[in-house]
Amino acid sequence: MTTAPSSRPSPSGFAAHGPLHLGIVGCSAEGAALCYRTICAEGAALFGPHAHPEVSMHTPSLHRYVEALDRGDLDAVAELMLDSAHRLRAAGAQLLLCPDNTIHQAFDLVQPRTPLPWLHIARVVADEARSRGFRRVGVLGTQWLVRSEVYPDALNAVGIEAVRPTDAWRDEIGARIMDELVTGRLESGTVERFQHAIDALRERGCDAVVLGCTEIPLIISDHNASLPTLDSTRLLARAALRAAVGTREPMSST
């Protein structure tokens, strides 16, 4: 099993041989950028002023992922993820993270062939949900993610029920993500529609909501949602920071 080193940070914040070099497997630009910014900005809390782990990122053209997802071709999704993984290893990365929930549908196809260990975004979120005592959690994200078992599997594994939005909400939220958020656009009324989708999950008994598209935290947070939010983007970035100094074990590469 390949894991992060067990050494703890020195008084300056760095482990004896420095923190792990993090590799970001990018998919959509806005989510990958938010994850990268979070790692760099919040690294100081562990490593000291202006300090953070070394970070490399590889991002193929988003259209290649979208076309594979539209075909339902998870093998092609896995190949794209693995290509990034190998490029990042060549760049010196030691631990991989992917700030995109949707393509984690291919995670099980990636694992047998990965050159490096990964953190799994949904398992990071599920651990946070369990630690906060949530029992019934709604999931917002792209159409592909909401239809998948990525979050039901991760949440059920820790004793939490996953609740999908209705088909109508799934389709509207998914369209607004792909037409607006991943392109850095925000139309009038979009924030309110996300809020209403969360309200609908609250009315169905949810006690929290997963922001299961890494762009959603750009517009929704605890401050404007009717449910506590689980910010998958920043939770993954913070887990990577902890793993970089050996305070969290990453998922095995085997």
Image (cartoon, helix red, strand yellow):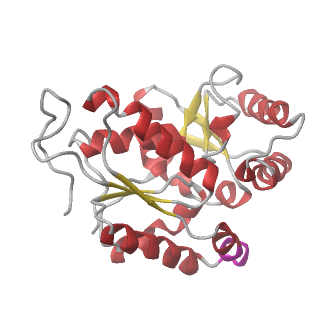
Q: Is residue 60 left or right of residue 146?
A: left
Question: The N terminus lies in which quarter of the figure?
Answer: bottom left
Q: Position of residue 3 (x, y in %)?
A: 21, 56
Range drawn in magenta:
67-72
Q: Is residue 65 depicted above or below 7 in this figure? A: below
Residue that appears at 15% across and 50% down: 5
Name the residue nearer the viewer: 56 or 125.
56
Q: Position of residue 161 (x, y in %)?
A: 56, 41
Question: The C terminus lies in which quarter of the figure?
Answer: bottom left
Residue that appears at 55% across and 36% down: 231
Q: Is residue 246 depicted above or below 226 in this figure? A: below
Q: Main secondary structure of the magenta part?
A: helix
Residue that appears at 45% across and 25% down: 132
Q: Is residue 141 left or right of residue 195?
A: left
Residue lying farthest top? 223
Residue 71 forms part of the magenta stretch? yes
